[in-house]
Amino acid sequence: MRIIRGTGLKGLRAFLPKSKFRSLTIIRPLIELHKKDILKWLESKNISYCVDKSNFEDKFLRNRIRLKLMPQLCEINPSIAQNLYNLSINTALDYDFIYTFSRKEFEKLKRGETKREIKLDLEGLKKNHPAILNNIIRIAIEELKGDTRKLELRHLDEIKDLIENRPSGSVVHLPGLSVRKEEKRLIIQTLIL
């Protein structure tokens, strides 16, 4: 679904059985089980369960994908579900490594933080690979706003252009944020109080 809507590496990843979110560890003990196996176990134990009838209505994109697109893709490649699963697992592992590395870089480059702004070392940012730089910026924005909703690739590209090409004193305005380049710092500031 996220491929259709447009996503990056983060959006392609699957949920891992164990993952970290800030200071929380999230454990999903049933994530690797197939629905049919869970239903079979419930039936063997004579345990009733509920079925959400809205899962069979095609007014939701996720249902249209599951009910219409997936059967067509299975005709082309019967292994498509397993292949997409493998892609999402491999992407999750890769993203976890990239995110962990980016988080460490973010902490090294942070030069000050308040509830309203984060200051990052400008020269240190410039030395990072574009993929790591994107993640450092996402982490900084998430620290300030609590999420990265409304942050698009074009916003990240504009911030990278600010870092690499624009003069000191230049500002980029984003949804709910401003990003200012100073001589030695990049200052990301929330506009929401």
Image: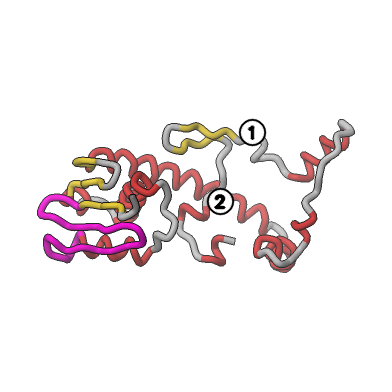
Secondary element at tag 1: loop
Q: Which residue is mark 1?
A: 29
Side of 138 relative to 35 (left or right) = left
Residue drawn at (40%, 63%) of the image? 152
Residue drawn at (27%, 38%) of the image? 107
- Residue range in magenta is 163-186
Q: Is residue 171 magenta?
A: yes
User: In terms of depth relative to the viewer, which is nearer, 190 or 72?
Assistant: 190
The spot of residue 168 in percent (x, y) is: 12, 60
In this rendering, the answer to whether 60 lies above or below 27 is: below
User: In terms of depth relative to the viewer, which is nearer, 117 or 104?
Assistant: 117
Secondary element at tag 2: helix
Q: Does the image show residue 182?
A: yes
Side of 60 relative to 142 (left or right) = right
Q: Does the image show residue 77?
A: no
For the N terminus, the quadrant is bottom right
User: In terms of depth relative to the viewer, which is nearer, 92 or 176?
Assistant: 176
User: In terms of depth relative to the viewer, which is nearer, 74 or 41?
Assistant: 41
The spot of residue 181 in percent (x, y) is: 17, 57
Point out which mark residue 116 bears: none
Cα distance in 3D space between marks 2 and 1 = 18 Å
Pointers 2 and 1 in contact (C-beta within 8 Å): no
Q: Earlier in the sequence, mark 2 or mark 1?
A: 1
Residue at the extreme front of the image, as rendered: 193
